[in-house]
């Protein structure tokens, strides 16, 4: 199996079949504290911190540049509150 990152897609080859994947994230905005760790660890600069606040008064992470997401899962891995879910879609 080979995994190749190119621009905003991930290409995976398995048994001579090539699949392209796009990513998307869902943030539980009510639990996010806006620490920014996900934003600084996103290699494609997909994530931003909102200027709005949640019910607890914290700004929250959101997909500022959704077309750039590759679904790498860096954001979910580093989130101290585990409020990010990453999805990958074959295209």
Image (cartoon, rainbow, N blue to C red):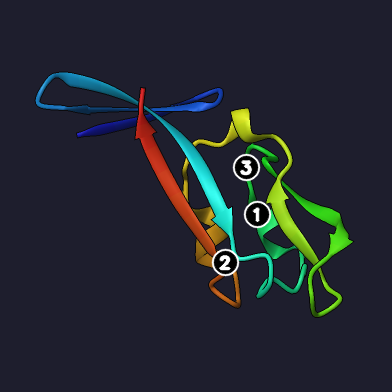
Q: Residue furthest front?
A: 55
Q: Residue at x 70, y 34 (%)?
A: 65
Tag shown at residue 14: none
In the picture of the structure, the residue carrying the numbered disc 2 is 78
Tag shown at residue 41: 1
Distance from disc 3 to disc 1, alpha carbons, whole Å, reads 6 Å
Give residue 22's position: percent from left, percent from top. Answer: 45, 31
Crowding at mark 1 (Cα within 10 Å: few <14, some 14-19, many 20+): some
Asked if residue 33 lies left or right of residue 88, the reply is right
Distance from disc 1 to disc 2, alpha carbons, whole Å, reads 8 Å
Q: Residue at x 47, y 45 (%)?
A: 72
Numbered disc 1: secondary structure:
helix
Give residue 82's position: percent from left, percent from top. Answer: 53, 72
Q: Are marks 3 and 1 in contact (CB under 8 Å)?
A: yes
Where, quadrant-wise, is the C terminus in this rendering? top left
Numbered disc 3: secondary structure:
loop
Tag shown at residue 43: 3
- Which of these two is toward me, 46 or 52? 52
């Amino acid at each position: 199996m080979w995994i190749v990152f190119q621009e905003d897609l991930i290409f995976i080859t398995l048994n001579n079949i090539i699949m392209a994947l796009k990513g998307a994230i869902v943030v539980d905005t009510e639990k996010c504290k806006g620490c920014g760790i996900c934003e600084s660890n996103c290699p494609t600069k997909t994530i931003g911190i909102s200027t709005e606040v949640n019910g607890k008064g914290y700004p929250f992470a959101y997909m500022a540049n959704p077309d750039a997401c590759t679904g790498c899962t860096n954001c979910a891995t580093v989130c101290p509150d585990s409020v990010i879910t990453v999805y990958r879609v074959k295209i």
